[in-house]
Image: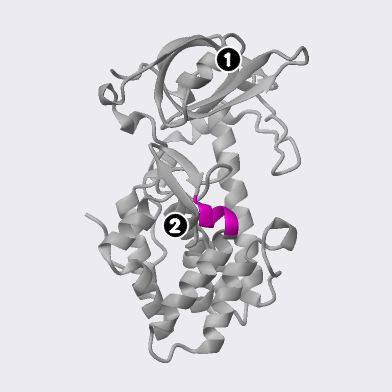
Amino acid sequence: MKKKIFIEQLKQGDRIDDLFLVKSARLAETKAGKPYLILAVMDRSGEVSGPVWENALEMQKICQPGIIIKISGVIQSYRDALQLKVERVQSVPRGEVDLGEFLPVSPRNRKEMADELSSLIRTISNPYLKKLLGRFFGREDDLLIFRDAPAAKGIHHAYIGGLLEHSLSMARLCHLLADHYDGVNRSLLLTGALLHDIGKLKELQANDGVVEYTVPGRLKGHLVIGCELVGRTAERIKNFPGDLLVQLQHLILSHHGRQEFGSPVVPMTVEAMILSFVDDLDAKMNLIEQLRRKMNSEDMEWTEYQRTLERYLYLGGFKEKTEQTDTKKKDVNRRQPSLFPGPEPD
């Protein structure tokens, strides 16, 4: 069975009878105490959600996260965002579908990003940091795991290849800022950019396209896990400088910027300050890009209230702007030019 239309193509008023992957299904109650289901579904282009008012308890049994379902319904607009009005749901055997149609993937080519990562590591001048990065990314199996990992369960870069895309984007920005400001240790900053979220490999696990937290991920969080991973790996490198390890671990532990955002400590070095701001910027810009992709109607100007940003966002006129720059954007999304010297990918 093949999909007929992808979520990014849906418009208000469209009737659908198509396949989707269940991202989440949560029971809630109306003011009158009647149960209903809040259903979120996805495909490789995005996600959409909506309430299921009838037979909520029975529907929850069908709509388990990670399974493929066929939905009949209508696309509506609610608070300037598309919403799914579900009329009928039926389960679909996984063997009858192409999972590649349902799992969101980075718009950038993952092999090309992996090649850029290897080129970047060759530019690291500090021999200990270069060797440390080699321990994490030098083996093909380890590189493949990092290449395909999502950066988050939700919010930003929450798709296959998202962790590598986010880490490389940060490294590109850090490379520019290290040249712009005096007194910045470039090797330390770029190593921090590439390893700041390395703990997410143990914090998150993806099963059937649905990203969930592991037990250590919930109990420790990726900052602590990443700090531990870097510490254990550095211990296996002969004469790895203790002060250098402490500074690198500080980058990892402080990159959320503030303790109320999950960092055990606030940034206290030049490199840590830069890294925390770049991480916040790249995450927010990716979130905005995801919101833009959902606003595929000329009538949509404002997003819903974004709790993570504590504001509404005005993205009016996005469709016209993207039509004007479509040709340029295609090449940029497919492959960004590398800042780092190295062989061009095939």
Q: Residue at x 67, y 22 (%)?
A: 28
Q: Residue at x 56, y 9 (%)?
A: 13
Q: Is residue 109 left or right of residue 187?
A: left
Q: Where is 99 relative to 331, above or below? A: above
- In this rendering, does residue 320 appear at all? no
Q: Nearer the viewer, residue 172 or 252?
A: 252
**Residue 136 location (% of width, % of height):** 37, 69
Disc 1 secondary structure class:
helix
Q: Is residue 311 left or right of residue 179?
A: right
**Residue 181 location (% of width, % of height):** 62, 75
Quarter placement of the C terminus: bottom left
**Residue 210 found in image quarter:** top left
**Residue 70 location (% of width, % of height):** 41, 15
Q: Residue at x 48, y 22 (%)?
A: 63
Quarter placement of the N terminus: top left
Q: Is residue 262 left or right of residue 133?
A: right
Q: Is residue 185 left or right of residue 99?
A: right
